[in-house]
Amino acid sequence: MIIAGRYSFNDGLNVVRSRYSNLLREITYIVKQVEASKCKTKKSKEKTMPGRVLYSPMALNKAFKKEFEKLGWECKKVKCDYPTEFYDEGYEHKALRDGAFREMDFIKEKLGVEVQFGKYAFMVYNVCAKMTIFHNLGFVNAGVEIVPIKNFADEMSTGVSYFEQFVWDLEKRGVSNIDIPVLIIGIDK
């Protein structure tokens, strides 16, 4: 695969280049190692493209995971202890199920990486919520979000978001004082 675009959210490009140059080289290497052609395995059942063979987000995620793990990147799961004190008085709540967690795909030396081939909301959540949460918990200081560019997303199921859309929205949203530096990387096959 190739890197087709880079967007610097909250000075993410400069921060990642200056503080994590070795890890940025690793990420670039990993992207190049993923063979997208091996991930074109999903037969569409959608009305707009029945029978068409598409890139499988699940297969792409597996391929990225394999390459990141080879270089010592680790997934981080954080258990969620949901509060119950905010229910209205008198509300009878059932005990919350154990096992809830938040997860960051890859972390190394306090740089977090998310690989996202899903719906638009997940991209926004990763950058505008999850990375801030993991920063507040002391696990990351900056992040990288790897997403497909439109050309690549067009060969996946409908609804997969893409780099250009994500950048437009982040530009219009602006940066908040709680946002951490994130480099958005747009990839293509």
Image (spheres, grey):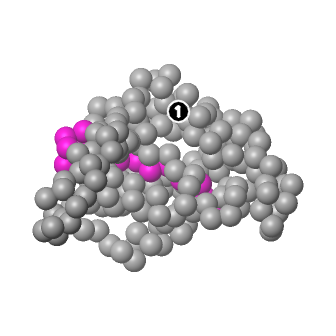
Q: What element does badge 1 sit on?
A: helix
Say if residue 112 shows up in the picture: no
Could you say which is closer to the camera, residue 13 or residue 85? 85
Say if residue 9 shows up in the picture: yes
Q: Position of residue 184 (x, y in %)?
A: 45, 55
Residue range corresponding to the magenta coloring:
134-151
Position of residue 11 in the picture relative to residue 64 (left or right): left
Position of residue 134 in the picture relative to residue 28 (left or right): left
Q: Position of residue 64 (x, y in %)?
A: 56, 36
In the orientation shown, which residue stands out farthest toward the bottom? 172
Q: Is residue 37 above or below residue 176?
A: above
Q: Is residue 98 magenta?
A: no
Task: Give the image quarter of residue 89.
Answer: bottom left
Residue occupied by mark 1: 65
Task: Give the image quarter of residue 104.
Answer: top left
Q: Where is residue 133 in the image (x, y as percent from the top left)?
A: 26, 51
Q: Is residue 47 above or below residue 36?
A: below
Residue drawn at the location 50% of the way across and 46% of the way down: 115
Could you say which is closer to the camera, residue 66 or residue 17? 66
Position of residue 18 in the picture relative to residue 90 (left or right): right
Could you say which is closer to the camera, residue 164 or residue 25? 164
Q: Position of residue 69 (x, y in %)?
A: 48, 26
Could you say which is closer to the camera, residue 68 or residue 42? 42
* Quadrant assignment for the N terminus: top right
Residue drawn at the location 54% of the way across and 29% of the way down: 67
